[in-house]
Structures are given as structure tokens and as C-alpha cells.
Amino acid sequence: MTPEDGSALKAPEAVIAGYAEPDERPLFLPYLAFMSIFGALLSAALLLARRQGRELPAKVSPGELLLVGTASHKLSRLVAKDKVTSPLRAPFTELEGKGGPAELEESSRGTGLRKAIGELLICPYCLDLWVVAGFSVGLLFAPRLTRFAAFLFSALTISDFFQIAYKAAEEKGLG
């Protein structure tokens, strides 16, 4: 997008043309909408917190960072991969097969917004930003409830690792 080739003056669709087939990557409108919604929601929450006199923490303790990071990891995987949450993803995804323990592998389906929602819902890495922001905003407005919810998901993460370790020990004849 250099001014010399005039691309900065083209319509947004023309600027991204050639990056990928439109049905493969719903770039312009759906992804831009997701970024805008995320930015607007986070900005609104921070503005509301400021108006209510809620201060952002001067620094975050390593314990809280670990709690929110671990909880976000688990909640993102739960939404994106768990068998039990597949009805949430089903309108936007197609089952590919079994994934990790109690997990499914899916691909997004459809085009445009439907495909973009599917891609967001099956990607724990993509969901992490939303979940981390949710926990972080939760700590501003309802810290006790948020810490409790984060504790549940963090404990579940630790439990999952023990389940995997136990199964591995069983398979080696140690369990």
C-alpha cells in the first residue's frame, strides 16, 4: 500500500485482492468487524471503569498473571475443542474427527461471516484474546467472582494434566 502505486486510494476489497480467494479468507468485513467489536467492547469497559472510579492495577502479581493465563487457556480450549461445547460451534463448523483427549477437530464452514465465526470458535489461540480480556475486565468490575471462575478453570487445567500423565503412566505399565 504505497502511495506510488495508488493502492491507498483503492476500495478496501481491491487493496486485499490477490491475498487469498474471498471464500478462503473472509478478511475484509467479518474480520474487521471482529476487531472493531473487540476494540469497542474493551474501550467501553475501560471507559465505564474510569467513570466509576475503578483504577487499573499499577502492576499485576505473578500469581494473578498465572491464574488468568491458565484459566484463559482452559476456557479457550473448552469453547474451541471440547465435545460438550460442540453444539455452540456446530452451526459454523464441520466435524473433521477426534482430536486430543475429550476434544474434537473441526473446520469452519460457509462463507463470509459464518466462516469467520467458525474460524474464531475453533481456534483456541484466537479465542484467548477475548477470554483474557473478559477475565481482565472481570477483575475490574467483579474481582471476587472473576477470581473464583478463574480458579475453577485453572484447577481444571491442572487436573487435565494429571489425567494425561496418569493415562501415559498406565500405558507404560506404571499405573
Image (spheres, helix red, strand yellow):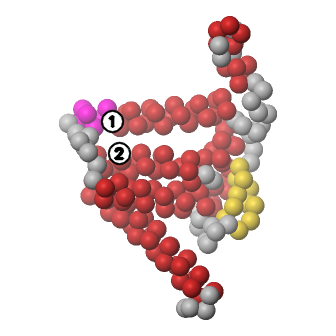
Residue 46 disc label: 1
Q: Residue 43 sits in which quadrant?
A: top left
Residue at 31% x, 32% y: name it: 47
Q: Nearer the viewer, residue 111 or 4?
A: 4
Q: Residue 159: give its label.
A: none
Determine the residue positioned at 63% across, 86% down: 171
Q: Judge by depth and name the residue closer to the eye, 58 or 78.
A: 58
Tell me which amino acid carries mark 2.
Answer: Val
Most frequent secondary structure within the magenta stretch: helix
Residue 137, numbered label: 2
**149 to 125, vertically: above or below:** below
Q: Residue 51 appears at what percent x and percent y? A: 24, 32
Q: Residue at x 71, y 10 (%)?
A: 5
Which quadrant: the N terminus?
A: top right
Residue segment shown in magenta: 46-52
Q: Are marks 1 and 2 in contact (CB under 8 Å)?
A: yes
Gap in Å between the C-alphas at discs 1 and 2?
A: 8 Å
- Left or right of 153, for residue 102: right
Q: Is residue 49 above or below residue 175?
A: above
**SS of the residue at dot 2?**
helix
Can residue 145 be seen? Answer: no
The location of residue 37, given as percent across then percent down, is 50, 34
User: Identity of the amino acid at label 1?
Assistant: Leu
Q: Which image quadrant: the C terminus?
A: bottom right
Comparing 152 with 172, the one in front is 172
Q: Is residue 145 above or below residue 25?
A: below
Labels 1 and 2: the sequence-earlier one = 1
Would you call the spot at circle 2 few (<14 residues within 10 Å), some (14-19), or many (20 or more)? some
Q: Which element is circle 1 on? A: helix
**In the foreground, 15 or 63:** 63
Query: Label 1 neighbourhood size at 10 Å, few (<14), some (14-19), many (20+)?
Result: some
Does residue 148 appear anywhere in the picture?
yes
